[in-house]
Image: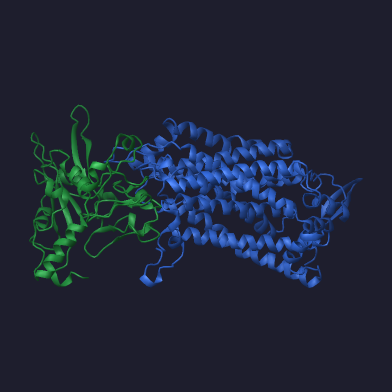
Chain colours: A blue, B green
Amino acid sequence: MQQRRELDQVYINRKLLNGQLDTPKWWAPTVTFLGVVVVIGLVVISIMINKGLGVTGLSRPVYWGLFITTFVFWVGISHAGIMISAILRLTQAEWRRPVTRAAELLTVFSLLTALVFPLIHAGRPWRIAYWIMPYDISRGIYPNIRSPLIMDPVAIGTYLTGSTLFLYIALLPDLGNLRDRTTGWQNAMYTVLALGWRGNPRQWKMQTVGGILLSALMLPIFVSVHSIVSWDFAIASAVEGWHSTIFAPYFVIGAVHSGVSAVVTMMALMRWLWKWDDFIRPEHFDALARLLIVVATGWLAFTFLELTFALYGQDAPEIALREMQMFQWPWNMLFIIFFLTAYLIPVPLWLFKRVRNNIAMMFWTSILVNVGMWLERFLIIVPGLARRTPFVYTWEAYRPSGVEWMIFIWAFAWVTFLMLLFSRFFPLVPLFEAKESQVFTDDVMIGRAKVPAIVREAD
Amino acid sequence: MATAEFGSHNWGMVVDVDKCIGCNACVIACQAENNIPLNTQDRVERARSISWIRVERYWEGDFPDAKARFIPIMCQHCENAPCEPVCPVYATYHNSEGMNVQVYNRCVGTRYCANGCPYIVRFFNYWEPVWPKSLRNHLNPDVTIRSRGIMEKCSFCVHRIRRVSRKARSEGHEVADGAVQTACSSSCPTSALIFGNFNDPNSKVSQMKEDQRHYTLLDQFGTDPNVIYLAKIDADKKVGAGEAASHG
């Protein structure tokens, strides 16, 4: 535990509301640039919808490619929010406090982005209404609930609703704070959004109870979302590399791995961009890196189990697929990069305390993890389809087109854009949590040294 | 079932690989019958060609005793089709006549069915279909032209089945064996493709199905296809039932 400054409430307010009350200079140019990228991406998406999926690199039999990979990637990232705020809240890990909101935001925005991909990926996106909603009741045609593609929107929709509520409940005290510090239209906006927050004991109690209840309710959804996404692949019984029974837990733990890493990336950026050194401290990075070591190693175990299960059956096509995935060009290159970035480089580094407390190192290692986790999804999805199957004269025919890469980039710009836009109007670090953690901390004397300690309230 | 009073049907096909000479007449007939856009060089190079039936080459045996074989492959109309449960909008389902049917109007183009299919016989329309001007008037009015963004596959020439069974019903008799011919089976010069009703024990397909050479493609997936293959007979080798069963 490091030495820590005693922060007074005025300082917390001024520092954490700097995004809203005095916007940093870099904000407007960055948001404008991202806005341009987002608009270009939207134009590319419209062109694709207008012209048809012929503009992608997809073929037969590689019917799913970059879009589905990116969809799974963003759903994975979205697992950060609940992991950090719900699970750590229920386990009363105090260090979670400054990161909770950023993590929840990441959940909401990455889900919003993930949802776009299956929809634009459909051949006729203007018809998706009756994919998702049983609107055609008069003809007796319901969506096919046996299909994981029906379970997907249900799971993601529930997750999105839940996390938005969760985010909003945690935002209420800060909205009240902002309402009291702004004038004009901003004041009017915060007044409406704050829902009459006055900070009396009853409201605090309800806010806390609501947060805890939602945390508990979100946990099963958290597990179900990525399980269902994994079933998109796992139930395709004829596709080697897809039809694995281990996919649900494997995908969930992989999602936590990539999601928590994304939170680390974001924390580093927040610390650098808004100068929140007093709030996002090396000890937080340290704690997250420790968590990541455990999660990543669990994920590694599942990766090996998946391979073991695949090879245990000694099924010739399955062995051929693994051989292609790991040893044949260009898949072997991707596989090596995947393995280095998702585990072999970051995790041994995190074993050193110096790395865990070094913000720049944590930033870059967490980026590496997400490069690796994206490749992991790609290596699951595409080789399974591109493999050589009996009686087919086309295979291995996939090279993502420029349009696909543009939309891929759009997704990253879009999430960052939403994030920055949010930061202009709402605090990224919860003020009340920062203050609460001050209340819960105290200094204890150990010998002559004054060491900060965390005390919890009795209830 | 609409056709119940005229006998229930379980349409299927028997493919005698031994008779197939690989002439590709079935491929062309299917292309013309079902309004399939031309497989231009560009489409083939991008691996986006559409051919509801294809003659696929494969190798049998190990070098130096390897033999090049060919086999016609179309939608197997599986009783236990992997493509059906995954479709979110019921665009593909099993009908009461043993066929795996594709409802173009429902399809939203998730392409999930194509990923599930082990025979890779489902095709996606990446572009709006186009024909040269000279071919516009050759399109078959009985068959829907599929717009871009939807899946298509062998329909067992369902429009021909409907036409014949409608006529039979109006005339008050059952559909005679051999009255329904798909485009591929009617064009096959060696009668390697036989179409008929498996529910009728006297039909040609029902009897051919009992041949000791019969097998189904990729039966390890348990798809229970309605297309039955009869194994190739090697001129220089005596084929027993055991070998026929392991074939393919």
Give the percent coordinates (x, y) of residue A390: 28, 41
Left or right: A26, with A252 as reference point: right
Q: Please name the residue shown 23% across and 36% down the image.
A: B58
Quadrant including the C terminus of chain B:
top left
Along the viewing direction, whichever of A446 and B148 lies nearer the viewer: B148
Extreme residue in the right direction: A448
Left or right: A279, with A86 as reference point: right
Quarter of the image holding residue A160?
Answer: bottom right
Q: Residue B185, relative to residue A158: is it above or below?
A: above
Q: How many marks?
A: 0
Along the viewing direction, whichever of A428 and A426 lies nearer the viewer: A426
Inspect this view and state whether residue A296 appears.
Answer: no
Q: Residue A238, relative to residue B234: is it above or below?
A: below
Along the viewing direction, whichever of A184 and A431 lies nearer the viewer: A184
Give the percent coordinates (x, y) of residue A16: 80, 51
Quadrant including the N terminus of chain B:
bottom left
Inspect this view and state whether residue A79 appears.
Answer: yes
Give the percent coordinates (x, y) of residue B212: 11, 49
Give the percent coordinates (x, y) of residue A174: 77, 60
Q: Please name the residue shown 12% across and 38% down the image.
A: B21
Left or right: A233, with A213 as reference point: left
